[in-house]
Image (cartoon, grey):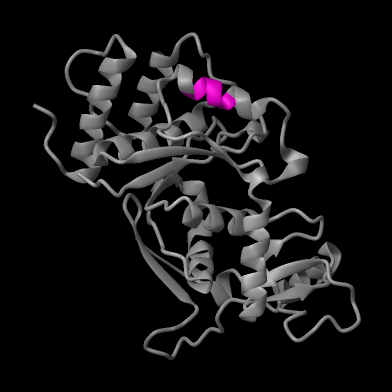
Amino acid sequence: MHEGYRGRFAPSPTGPLHFGSLVSALASWLDARAHGGTWLVRVEDIDGPRTVPGAAEDILATLECFGLQADEPPEWQSRRIDLYRAALDQLIAASHVYPCGCTRKEIADSLLHAHRRNTTLIYPGTCRGGLHGKPARAWRLRVPDDDPQADDNPALIRFDDRWQGPQQQDLATEVGDFVLLRADGQWAYQLAVVVDDAAQNITHVVRGADLLDSTARQIWLQQCLGAPTPAYLHVPVVTNEEGEKLSKQTGALALDTTRPLEALLAAARHLGLDLRGPTPATLEAFQTGAIDAWKRRLLRLPATA
């Protein structure tokens, strides 16, 4: 077992919990329980315009109803603004970030020009050398310059995902300098999640594969801040009949809190878990069987005797 294990589920309160979110919540909870570790819940309400009043409380109540209890009181990103400001100040002092004065239209126009040249559509670094008289709108993190001839290309971030396997992304050619503080004054997800994971001593991140593409950026930001890099595991996302990721934007329905066991069994099936034996009739029986199934599938451990 992993006594130092600390995992988390970090929902955004843009609406009620749906089945896609339940899959991620269950996977992170099972991984923590299978390791004998600590499981936290963090409400990612940093994007004020998208936050729905009352949604966070509804999500927390739904998790409780489904038997997914956190081991510590929930954290709220909106109460951690001072941490994000301190992190940005640290990056400014180290010259890792720069102010950007580009509007959305200017970036779109430059990307359209890049597309015509058949090059990768990334932020072209317009403000890397200064604002050239434009007012600052956002702050961007400078990514390493690409050096494909080097034995260790500084722009190439590699990591092993516990579900998806070996991963790599060239930040210079596939991402470009990315925003940490938006023009509307909102803190970007990439900064908030890295700062929060470090502050909460998160050792293992289990989440949906839709966030796999963000991981290399977060690892680079961790390196810039001197923060540790957790182990990552990205589970397959749930899709609708059109093949789109199930989300509030694609019409995902709220979970039925009167039938938690049915939804949990469906989530376990989505994760490919073999519960064995008769279908569990209680939440406690489900949890016992699901933890054992997770151990067999992900930790390669024998089931509980």
184 up-or-down from 258: above or below: below
- Residue appearing at x 54%, y 72% in the figure: 171
Q: Which residues are magenta?
A: 59-63
Residue 197 appearing in the image? yes
Residue 124 falls in image quadrant: bottom right
| Relative vertical location of residue 42 with respect to residue 82 in this rendering, above or below | above
Looking at the image, residue 292 lies above or below residue 237: above
Secondary structure mostly seen in the magenta stretch: helix
Q: Nearer the viewer, residue 176 or 304?
A: 304
Tell me: 204 left or right of 113.
Answer: left
Asked if the magenta segment contains residue 118, the reply would be no
> Toward the viewer: 178 or 104?
178
Q: Is residue 14 left or right of residue 148?
A: right
Q: Residue furthest left?
A: 305
The N terminus lies in quadrant? top left
Q: Is residue 122 visible?
A: no
- State the quadrant of the C terminus: top left
Locate residue 54, reporting x and y percent: 69, 25
Residue located at (77% from left, 66% from top) = 138
**Which quarter of the picture shows residue 97?**
bottom right
**In the rendered image, which quarter is residue 287 located in?**
top left
Q: Nearer the viewer, residue 264 or 149?
A: 264
Residue 275 x/y as whole percent: 23, 24
- Provide residue 286's location: percent of width, then percent of height: 29, 19
x then y, percent, for residue 182: 75, 59
The residue shown at (30%, 34%) is 272
